[in-house]
Image (spheres, rainbow, N blue to C red):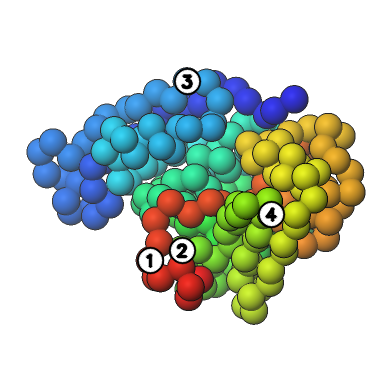
Amino acid sequence: MTATRTAPTVLAWRDYDPAACELPGMYLGEVPLPGPARGQAARLWELGARRVRLPAPVDLSTAADPAAAVHGLCLVRDLTARAVMVEWELRLDPHEGETWRRLSHLQPPVALHGPADAEQTLRSWRRGHYLCKCLWRKGPGFLQIRDRRWGELRRFTADEPEYDTAVRLLDYGALADTVDQTALADFRSEHLVLDVGPYAWWLPYRVSRWLQQSIAI
């Protein structure tokens, strides 16, 4: 079972720069994103959106709706992969201050709620963020993750079919008990999935826009 729900309406503009967004014709208005998260970032891109604002915080606190949180994370991740400017807020439980490191390959939120050191965390996130910080690619008969969230380059390469199946399930959120447990345990040990309530969600993205030659990533 995949984590899905009706997506919220988002605000969208044709340019990422706030001053340019004030010009006539730049505002795309409120864009409804009905259905599951898969494909919504591509739809926004095709509409011309280069700046997107989520209407409500992505809430990862224990009292929140986990399916809604996964949906929001998918949108932020997929828009980050397209280098779209995403304006979003993140809410964590006060004791979950280190969760941000797992999310640090995503475009930094405009506000972080919950942790006592939220402002310091946001500064670190913003200073350290760049595109392609944690990505995955699929080759002929294998998949590979390249992860720099902790500074050094970490690679995870697998050619077993159960890993490929697990990634396809996890990509937009899956109930953790429906995923191959060996693959899930390996992904958890490498901090490649985030547990959100009963769901496990795939953190890396498949990049859509390269800022450097691929050999340098």
Sequence-earlier tag: 3 or 2:
3
Residue reaching furthest to the bottom: 152
Residue type indicated by callout 1: Leu
Label drawn at residue 131: 2
Residue under pointer 4: 142
Q: Which residue is mark 3?
A: 34
Tell me where residue 40 sits by quadrant: top left
Which of the image's four quarters has the N terminus? top right
Q: Taking 146 as reference, is 176 above or below it? A: above
Q: Which residue is mark 1?
A: 211
For label 1, the SS is loop
Question: Which numbered disc, 4 or 1, marks the residue that appears first in the sequence?
Answer: 4
Instruction: Verify CB contact (< 8 Å) between mark 2 and mark 1.
Output: yes
Kindly state the secondary structure of the residue where label 2 is placed: loop
- Residue 58, quarter of the rendered image: top right
* 37 relative position to 53: left or right: right
- Kindly give the residue lying farthest to the front in the view shown: 140
Q: State if disc 4 and disc 2 touch (CB < 8 Å).
A: no
Q: Is residue 98 above or below residue 40?
A: below
The residues bearing labels 2 and 1 have C-alpha atoms spaced at a distance of 7 Å
Residue at far left of view: 24
Measured as percent of width and height from the top left, residue 142 is found at: 69, 54
Q: Nearer the viewer, mark 1 or mark 3?
A: 1
Label 1 to label 3, Cα distance in Å?
A: 31 Å
From the top left corner, tell me how far across and down residue 60 is, in percent. Answer: 67, 43
Q: Residue at point 77% right, 45% down?
A: 161
